[in-house]
Amino acid sequence: MKVFFLNILLLFSFNILSLPPCFTSCGIGTNSQVRDGATFTTTTIAGSSSGWSNGSNSQTSNDSRATNTSSLASVGNYTDYLVITNFGFSLPATDNVHAIWVVIERRDPNAKVSDNSIKTVVSGSITGYERANTTTTWSTSDTYICYGGANDTWGNILTGADVNSSNFGVAISIKRNVSGGTAIGEIDHVYIEICYSPDPPPWLPVELLYFEGKQIDNNVAVNWATASEKNNSYFVLNKMTNTDFGFTQKATIQGSGNSQNLKSYEYIDTDLTSGTTYYSLDQVDYDGTIENIGITAIDIKLKEDPICLYSHESDAIILKLPKNETIKSVKILGIWGQEYIIIPNIKLQNDQLVLSYDVSKLPRALYTLVVETNNSVFYKKITK
């Protein structure tokens, strides 16, 4: 028994009796490793008011503490990052990381500071999602606080090789959030637990930031963005109007495969009817797995479409527009790129603007009439 406990203590390098609730929080079927950092540096944040001293004191829980070098004078003042890396993980290089727990034992005897920023360090860069609790003041006594959660990789897609690297770790910045007195944060111990498995992580392959539609003239722009994607082959955009009995596929859009960066997508729907239209977005993995990740609705109000006629008898184009339109320009485009600027006759008739133009001198062909108004641009095909 003595040998057993000695090995455990040597492996984890801290007092087992003080372990916080998030320890051994990995799911069934996953493995875990817990390590302390071995390299302690400071990374400057623009506008910061203090650095860090004695960073290595946060390696073990022994009441010797890392602290910010000077008191944060005003509410909102913050420190540089205390960067802790070189945790010495030894995961199988190709295994997948399912969760990252960062555990910090810290205190502020004067109860003046809170988290400012807590992020992962991957390949030497401070990155990933923010996990700081910026509103809760640190306790006056040493307290272990867990950052992360089941299936939370902080926005990173990582393998064992990534966390085994000596430049993987965590970056910590604190700030003053209570006025008066001295604002010095003290960190006694920081360690990281990694949950991992040969299997892919169970979280959704796409983290959707937004999915929305917006009417622009007589079109709808459907936009969405992702914060991260994993094994994302493509998206399927489906559509349903208020007269349909279900969704029908409208388009497929190529995904970004594996990405940890913001990706934006857009589809322009030109086939519209007035009334409520619903759009549904499916995400398809490389293995064919389909997941619906969003539905949005838009109330479409089509602008009145102009009436365009070509009169063979009078060899003239007649165009009717709503009377509230102001004509800015009218032109005719030929199929080979010819452009004819025209000045039509305009008159008001039955609450409509009626434009007419003699096209008798134009050769017989297919043309496009382009009318720009104060509100829109109208296009009409004409066969002469």
Image (cartoon, helix red, strand yellow):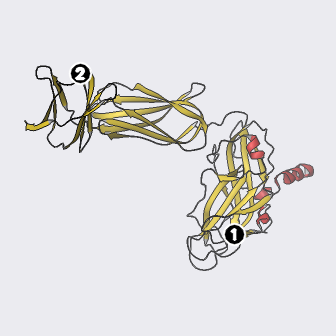
Instruction: Decide if residue 352 is in sight here.
Output: no
Return the x and y of residue 10 as percentages of the image width and height: 87, 53
Residue at image x 84%, y 51%? 11
Residue 275 marker: none
Pair 1/2: label in front: 2
Residue drawn at (57%, 75%) of the image: 74
Can you see residue 261? Answer: yes
Residue 75 position (above or below residue 60):
below
The residue that label 1 is drawn on is 51
Rendered-image quadrant of the C terminus: top left
As rendered, which of 233 and 74 lies closer to the eye?
A: 233
- Please identify the quarter of the rendering in which residue 77 is found: bottom right
Across and down, in percent, residue 230 comes to: 61, 36
Q: Tell me, yes or no, whether the two marked residues, 1 and 2, touch with CB atoms within 8 Å.
A: no
State which tag comes first along the sequence, 1 or 2.
1
Asked if residue 279 lies left or right of residue 39, the reply is: left
